[in-house]
Image: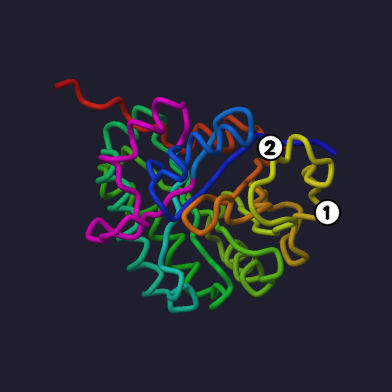
């Protein structure tokens, strides 16, 4: 068995403090190093609240710690909808992401960005929604950025949600792209450092859903939730069998340097 690299995700800003430490400080203390990626939500440019990524408040702290943003598309209650629903949501997701970081900046980082569709299982993903979402994600990102940026469809889902993974498999068979899975299978709860726990070695046989064939790549495993409670973060591990740089890090976003006054 092997181990990957640490990741984290949160529905609160990384600047959130618990006991006098921000979430990045807490995660770094847990893992002994900063996470390589941090999952944050992108719904639309008009979305308010702190569940949504707030670049003006979060960019600098993530950049200073060398942590890349892992974009998550959040419209969880709509993912069992139609092709038209998926397409409309992808349009909003893409514009949110590109307006947040800027097309020129994303192009300077390589021009390809992964985006994970958040599927929590209530409801499960429908094939129709995935077809609309995945097709529009790539096409609209290219048109909205004048060809500079392509956003690549991925899916976050639970290990037991076989209906979701069957929808992905059927979508791929129908010709749409899929660039990787992020699997939630909690082996524990709260703050646990996978580096020091043999039970948290990355085991594809444990992490992979039964309906997700071996030819479809798993990029991350969310092995524990709610480190420091609901205002804290979830604990993730990258798949040690992927090319970490090419498959994941180069396609996540290192936030830009803050502007010089």
Secondary structure beneath dot 1 equals: helix
In the drawing, what numbered circle is on residue 205? 1
| Frontmost residue, 200 versus 178 | 200
Give the magenta-colored segment's residue range.
Answer: 39-68
- Please give the name of the residue rendered at 34% of the width and 27% of the height, measured from the top-left corner: 108
| 28 sits to left or right of 203 | left
Q: Is residue 137 magenta?
A: no
- The image position of residue 56, as x and y in percent, is 25, 40
- Please give the name of the residue rendered at 43% of the width and 38% of the height, measured from the top-left corner: 20
Secondary structure beneath dot 2 equals: loop
Q: How far apart are the two marked residues, 1 and 2, measured between alpha carbons?
A: 15 Å
- Please give the name of the residue rendered at 62% of the width and 53% of the height, measured from the top-left corner: 181
- The image position of residue 218, as x and y in percent, is 67, 49
| 164 sits to left or right of 107 | right
Disc 2: which residue: 242
Rate crowding at label 2 as few (under 14), some (14 to 19) or many (20 or more) other CA atoms within 10 Å. some
Vertical order, 72 against 98 (above or below) = below
| Frontmost residue, 252 versus 129 | 252
Q: Quadrant of residue 135?
A: bottom left
- Image quadrant for the N terminus? top right
Q: Is residue 59 magenta?
A: yes
- Image quadrant for the C terminus? top left
- The image position of residue 134, as x and y in percent, is 46, 60
């Amino acid at each position: 068995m092997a181990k990957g690299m640490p990741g984290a995700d949160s529905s609160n800003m990384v600047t959130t403090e618990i006991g006098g430490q921000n979430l990045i400080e807490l995660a770094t203390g847990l893992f002994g190093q900063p996470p390589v990626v941090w999952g944050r939500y992108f719904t639309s440019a008009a979305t308010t609240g702190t569940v949504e990524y707030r670049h003006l408040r979060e960019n600098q702290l993530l950049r200073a710690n060398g942590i890349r943003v892992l974009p998550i598309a959040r419209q969880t209650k709509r993912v069992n909808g139609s092709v038209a629903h998926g397409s409309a949501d992808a349009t909003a997701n893409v514009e949110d992401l590109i307006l947040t970081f800027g097309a020129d900046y994303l192009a300077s980082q390589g021009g390809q960005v992964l985006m994970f569709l958040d599927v929590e299982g209530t409801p499960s993903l429908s094939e129709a929604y995935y077809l609309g979402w995945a097709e529009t994600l790539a096409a609209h990102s290219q048109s909205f950025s004048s060809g500079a940026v392509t956003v690549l469809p991925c899916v976050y889902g639970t290990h037991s949600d076989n209906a979701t993974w069957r929808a992905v498999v059927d979508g791929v068979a129908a010709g749409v792209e899929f660039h990787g899975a992020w699997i939630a299978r909690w082996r524990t709860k709260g703050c646990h450092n996978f580096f020091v726990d043999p039970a948290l070695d990355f085991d594809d046989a444990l992490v992979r859903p039964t309906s997700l064939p071996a030819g479809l790549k798993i990029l991350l495993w969310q092995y524990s939730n709610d480190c420091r409670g609901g205002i804290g973060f979830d604990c993730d591990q990258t798949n040690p069998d992927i090319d970490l740089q090419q498959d994941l890090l180069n396609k996540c976003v290192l936030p830009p340097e803050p502007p010089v006054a």
